């Protein structure tokens, strides 16, 4: 349908304005034909054959026109079946007697962050409830058992264990929220990975001894990275601690350091229980455990590997796992080597 020159001009001016704002917008006629759209809208693939392809967006436009007011909605949208779904915020408003403008904002990332935050809070509340209710029950039991010294002793030991677990969990949550913000708030400097591994091994010797696991390390000297040594030590400690905790007595845990393809490569290998292939990606999620009861029994929080992953990301590195059930696991932490430029910074 041929539109008047004036209508076309109104649409073109509106689109020019949207382009200045780098905004996605589509202008529709009273017959719901798309008369013009901004470059950003084209890239989003909102229109095909001169029509909006999403029925919810079309409905929004119809409502704005019928009620002669501004209407907004949130919709999941994908331009085709193969494309990833985007989360869009859309607003439709009358632009003139004839035209409606539909403005669309991609809020996928904001929505993802909001969902992650929501999940995190929900998980934390759930995780905190368990030790808190155990502490509450044990303290009640203590009151009742005052006349029975053996029972008092047992409840006191359990109480101590639960309160330590609670403290450990709270610490991990604090550590994780710090590094999740992408924050390397510790001092960023040249880090000698050999020293750092020695320290992480050292702090796990007691645990290894208690569980009868032989802990050894084999590192090449003078491998340096740029980073937050506290955070990296925490990550390596977590990997070693897991290797010990998910191994049977009389087994071995080995920690290695070498340079491979221009990256520092730290490996932690155990011949413990292993991880099923289909769960190997999920173990890096917060609070994900392959066997929740075993994790709880060993004092696990489900946060150790999430911390490792974030620490690796924050340093421009990555963490990977190779594991077979019943044979054992190797976790590999790769970090970019210190460059000459870093040295001069
Ligand atoms: P947790 O505190 O439960 O150990 P992590 O985030 O450190 O939490 O690890 C997540 C899950 O990954 C563990 O609960 C366990 O199921 C599995 N896992 C981690 N490391 C190992 C390992 N070396 N061997 C076998 N399973 C492991």
Image (cartoon, helix red, strand yellow):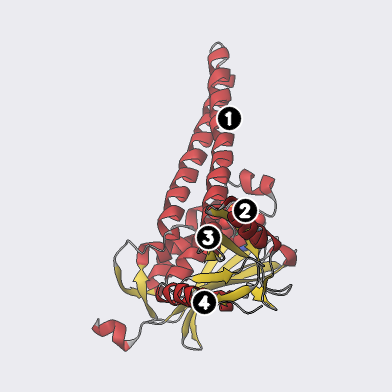
Upstream in sequence: badge 3 or badge 2: 2
Q: Which residue is mark 1?
A: 134
Q: Which mark is residue 66?
A: 2
- Name the spot of residue 309 as percent of width and height, x first: 52, 65
Circle 2 crowding by C-alpha within 10 Å: few under 14, some 14–19, many from 20: few
Q: Is residue 307 visible?
A: yes
Between discs 2 and 4, the one toward the N terminus: 4
User: Considering only order in the chain, which callout, 3 or 4, is on the residue closer to the N terminus?
Assistant: 4
CA gap, disc 4 and disc 3: 17 Å
In the depicted structure, whether residue 134 falls above or below residue 220: above
C-alpha span from label 3 to label 2: 10 Å
Spatial separation of the CA atoms under disc 1 and disc 4: 59 Å
Q: Please tell me whether mark 3 or mark 1 is closer to you in this view.
A: 3
Q: Nearer the N terminus, badge 3 or badge 1? A: 3
Q: Is residue 202 visible?
A: no
Please say if the residues under marks 3 and 2 sit with CB atoms less than 8 Å apart: no
| In the image: residue 1, left or right of residue 99 | right
Q: Are marks 1 and 4 in contact (CB under 8 Å)?
A: no
Pair 1/4: label in front: 4
Q: CA distance from mark 3 to mark 1?
A: 60 Å
Q: Residues within 10 Å of mark 1 (few under 14, many from 20)?
A: some
Mark 3 falls on what kind of element? strand
């Amino acid at each position: 349908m041929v539109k008047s020159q004036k209508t076309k001009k109104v649409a073109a001016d509106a689109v020019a304005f949207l382009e200045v704002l780098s905004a996605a917008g589509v202008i529709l006629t009273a017959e719901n034909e798309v008369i013009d759209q901004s470059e950003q809208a084209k890239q989003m693939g909102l229109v095909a054959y001169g029509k909006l392809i999403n029925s919810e967006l079309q409905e929004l436009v119809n409502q704005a026109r019928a009620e002669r007011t501004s209407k907004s909605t949130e919709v999941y949208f994908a331009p085709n079946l193969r494309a990833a779904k985007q989360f869009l915020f859309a607003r439709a408003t009358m632009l003139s007697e004839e035209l409606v403008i539909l403005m669309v904002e991609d809020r996928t990332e904001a929505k993802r962050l909001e969902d992650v935050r929501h999940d995190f809070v929900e998980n934390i509340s759930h995780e905190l409830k368990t030790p808190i209710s155990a502490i509450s029950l044990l303290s009640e039991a203590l009151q009742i058992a005052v006349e029975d010294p053996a029972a008092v002793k047992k409840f006191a030991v359990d109480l101590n264990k639960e309160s330590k677990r609670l403290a450990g969990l709270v610490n991990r949550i604090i550590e994780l929220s710090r590094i999740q913000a992408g924050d390397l708030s510790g001092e960023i400097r040249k880090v000698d990975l050999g020293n750092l591994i020695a320290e992480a091994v050292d702090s796990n010797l007691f645990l290894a001894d208690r569980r009868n696991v032989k802990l050894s390390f084999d590192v090449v000297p003078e491998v340096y990275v740029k980073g937050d040594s506290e955070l990296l030590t925490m990550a390596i400690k977590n990997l070693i601690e897991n290797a010990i905790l998910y191994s049977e007595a009389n087994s071995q845990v080995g920690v290695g350091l070498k340079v491979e393809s221009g990256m520092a490569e730290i490996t932690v290998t155990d011949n413990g229980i292993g991880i099923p292939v289909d769960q190997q990606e999920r173990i890096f999620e917060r609070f994900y455990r392959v066997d929740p009861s075993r994790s709880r029994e060993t004092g696990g929080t489900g946060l150790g590997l999430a911390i490792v992953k974030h620490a690796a990301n924050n340093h421009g590195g990555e963490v990977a796992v190779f594991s077979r059930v019943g044979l054992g696991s190797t976790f590999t932490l790769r970090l970019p080597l210190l460059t000459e430029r870093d040295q001069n910074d």
